[in-house]
Amino acid sequence: MGLWSSWGRWLAAMSSDLLPPRFQDWFAAKGWQPRAHQLALIEKHAARRSTLLIAPTGAGKTLAGFLPTLIELADRPKRNAIRPTGIHTLYISPLKALAVDIERNLEKPIAEMGLPVRVETRTGDTPASKRDRQRRQPPDILLTTPEQVALMVSSKDAESFFDSLERVIFDELHSLTPSKRGDLLALDFARLRKLSPKLVATGLSATVRDPPELQAWLVGQGILFSSPLGEGVRQSLTDEGDPLTSGVYPHPPAAVRHLLPREKEWTNLADLVLAEKSIAAPPVIEILDTAERLPWSGHTSKHAIREIYELIGRHRLTLVFVNTRMQAEFLFQLLWGANEDGLRIALHHGSLDVGQRRKVEAAMGAGGLDAIVCTATLDLGIDWGDVDLVINVGAPKGASRLLQRVGRANHRLDEPSKAILVPSNRFEVLECRAAVDAARAGEQDAAVSRTGALDVLAQHVLGMACTAPFLADDLFAEITSAAPYAEVDRETFDAVLAFVATGGYALKSYERFAKIRQGQGGFWRAANPRIIQQYRMNVGTIVEATMLKVRFGRKGRGAMMGGRMIGEVEEYFAETMVHGDTFIFGGEVLRFEGIFEDSVLVSRAAPRTDPKVPSYAGGKFPLSTHLAARVRNMLGDPESWTALPDQVADWLRLQQDKSVLPQAGDMLVETFPRGGRFHLVAYPFEGRLAHQTLGMLLTRRLERAGMKPQGFVCNDYALSVWGLSDISLRAAREPGFIGALFDQDMLGDDLEEWLAESGLMKRTFRYCAVIAGLIERKFPGQEKRSRQVTMSTDLVYDVLRSHEPGHILLRAARADAATGLLDIGRLSDMLSRVRGRIVHKALERVSPLAVPVLLEIGREAVNGEAADALLEEAAGEMMADVMGSRT
Amino acid sequence: MISAQTVIRPDDISMSAVNVNGATLHLDHHGAVWWPDERTLIVADMHLEKGSAFAARGQLLPPYDSAATLAKLVRVVARHRPQRLIALGDSFHDTGAGQRMDEAALSALSVLSAGLQMVWITGNHDPEIPSGLPGERLTALVLGPLTFRHEPQPGVQPGEMAGHLHPAAKVVSERGKVRRKAFVSDGHRMILPAFGAYAGGLNCMVPAVAGLFGRGAFTAHVCGTTRVFAVARARLAGD
């Protein structure tokens, strides 16, 4: 009691010091008390300190971010009659919708206090006329997105546009930084700091495990001092040699070592303000204890539909989160199938037509819905309505993601948020349990330290040449002040610059086609206006998997033509389908008719057709390292099983009985015969991506060892490789055989060879080629058809790889693959973790733990020898037909 | 899971020999046709200097496509030692290709075409073959039962050997999917795959390709990594 009243007195004293009377009155009229973190941000800004605010959802983060601006603008003098204002504060949000939402929320206090402040938004939807007006008459506060910032800082009048900029606010910073989008924004932010040296930054973030990562992002890195010539020179941060040049493969091999995350030391950190924890009531998270039989595999949660439906019926507004668009479609369909009471259930995911999404959002805000089935599109902090229950279907994949989603319920701090997890299979029960424990302990997933992508840097360099001529030395100093690029060496930067200019090829044949040229005084500038136009049409880093439009087909001139558009699907998904396949989209069962130009043509499937939903191996996100460790601990500790549903605990006991459950630090490998094949199943729990890479590499090794491997499957927890030779027998004869299979040296030559032909690598290269501007996304007067892009980048990759394997774009693609689709960093950690700790169990038959992974089916593109084998099979079927026998 | 399969060894059945209108042709998995009776090698759609054509428009694709295509051509020529080489059109990506091509590529082409009878069939991309290169320039050529031209003609065309369409075939099974360049033939005519390093592929199930064959019956001879695989139409997938 005493503590609270003195805290209250302190707050009141601080308020009167920091808040002008007009603001104090406004707070009082609302019956609100300014919060400590809100006051702290005012104080930080007054001291011109860049600051990271970490606060849970609903803690008044947005108001905290804008208060310093509103206070300063309350008595800003007019500049002059022609241009009375300039942009004072730039607010950047990852979502267009969030910017629009903030505009609404800001207008209230501005109007109520009668502040002379003009707020405007600028997004991809803003008409050109309004943008023009904004250029001539800038608002005081501009709310925008990262892509618009890139366009603004690369425009001809960037310098005058930002000359009065005082503050920049990054909302949901934690969601922006671990991506290429964040890389580009970091580079543009470095330019803003240069345009306006007095700029003070504020980052708003949800709770993260590693705040320094974000604190470093918010301020310039490196030490800039002036050389006698007046050029900025940057002092080197590290004295490490270039890992690329350090010779033959040690472990891990040099080729990948520089791709692995490592500890960074920052020269400069923004201040940190933490919102007081006590104001947020701890969330109440439960796991649905289903009365139904839990499936072994799959991600549909079909078994629990009835229970989910009943939960929706008992609450005001429920958000049902799933991990992929296809899961959303499937669940939506099932819920309507069970909807006897006519509940108002809507669907929201990124592939749906924008108009349709806006309708759902509006209905949600107006209280016209009972539930929304949604994907990550609703993860971030928009206030839609009075959500009182969050259901997470499938595994949450990470503790931080779970907390973020749970925070969507009851956007008020005084009431606890309520969430129910619905595991869709037995393994996911373990994962949900681990996530709930982690959330209770307030643990977050570690952010992977990010190194800025080189393809993004290439795009930025071109953009900088479009705004004004630059010197290479100056731009190098500028880009290395951005935290993600702090460790870029000069050689790499020069290679990127050469790439932008003439493609950076050893064969220097493109001088005459240069996009940027060095002119008088060594200044680089765009070669011609067309290059600038080209750049502006291709800005941004969101290359999502190439999307194909989904249209109803209609008969026209004999062939099928595209009719009404329903939405978009990823190209790779469309490619897995063949004529006649059925899938769910937009809440309907559709029949795949074919691909016509950039569209997937579909027809309505016959009533009561069972959709053939693709088996997505887990969600889009791999299991986080942190949760994986918790799951491993749980398996090794039978005492903890009491917290699990009976059918899951029984399953684990059965496993103990038939095989073994490894201790937390050990990795279990089982070998057994099944259906005429010999299987090897390993349980690393490192996520699907790392397992996929491991599977590819293990297959190569088994091939070399003469074990005749035939294929592999994996999920987030385990992988299985099968072949024609008896692995148990081999392991019995050669005791070191299994251990050697998992030796770390597989990340050397095996990885190299595999990368050479990997379809994943080609896909990754395509993204890099588009972002770096090698392939145009759009060009005035011609929209490049996505299928042509696919084709040509694959061919370009093959040619480039054989002629110039060290090219900067291949380096970029490799780095992406290592951290992204291949997850080499995690695989490498895992291989060193299990060294000497592999528990091998040779079994007579499949073990209980192995059942789920054996039920997965893969439909990935195959390459190399496997591709020939597949073709041979197809050819073989024909031969068998010819010879009158079936194989 | 995946059913047991019969493994067919490459030497068991010679899949690469096919008959087109009475001529026995061998299909090279690099995408070339070898006609032993006439000691003639045929390639289509090399699209030389496609990379630099894109570069001129601001897309700086790696400038190695001509070198890659010609290196492959040299390998195929060395393997079969033809007396005659027929380039089935679109050998050059555009009329400026000759000027943009570097010395090494030009001399490789000259050396290659000097030791044999070179026939340049003209295509829509290369109505004019760069001057200075040896060889005949023709719009079409008839040799025995076969007629060589760039664009396949509609209707029944016995013995027509054409390019232009860049056919590719896609095979899908439970194990995955494969999309590769392919020769498409019904025994009466044949469409060759594009030989060029940057030439993309068009699925042979689209009407533009499939429609050229009577009743739609044809076989795709798919270029694998080590050899050509004959795949029946029923086993092919659209895109």
Image (spheres, helix red, strand yellow):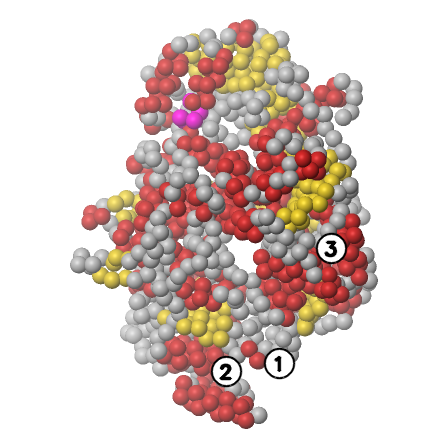
Q: Give neighbour class at mark 2: few <14, some 14-19, many 20+ (Cα, 10 Å).
A: some
Residue A404, located in which quarter of the rendered image? bottom right
Same chain? Circles 2 and 3: yes
Residue B5 showing in the rendered view: yes
Q: Is residue A304 left or right of residue A454?
A: right
Up-down relation of residue B135 to residue A475 (above or below): above
Q: Chain of mark 2?
A: A
Earlier residue among tags 1 and 3: 1
Q: Is residue B96 left or right of residue A472?
A: right
Q: Chain of mark 1?
A: A
Q: Quadrant of residue A159?
A: bottom left
Residue A645: image quadrant is bottom right
Q: Nearer the viewer, mark 2 or mark 3?
A: 3
| Residue at the (29%, 74%) spot, across then down | A79
Residue A35 marker: 2
Q: Which chain does the numbered disc 3 sit on?
A: A
What type is the residue that disc 2 sits on?
Arg
What secondary structure is found at the residue carrying circle 1? loop
Kindly state the secondary structure of the residue where label 2 is placed: loop
Q: Identify the residue position indicated by label 3 in the image.
A: A425
Sequence-wise first label, 2 or 3: 2
Residue B69 lies in the magenta-colored region: yes
Q: Is residue A542 magenta?
A: no
Mark 2 or 1 closer to N-term?
2
What is the span of residues highlighted in magenta in the rendered image? B66-70
Residue denoted by label 1? A414
The image position of residue A14, as x and y in percent, is 43, 87
Q: Position of residue A807 (x, y in %)?
A: 39, 39
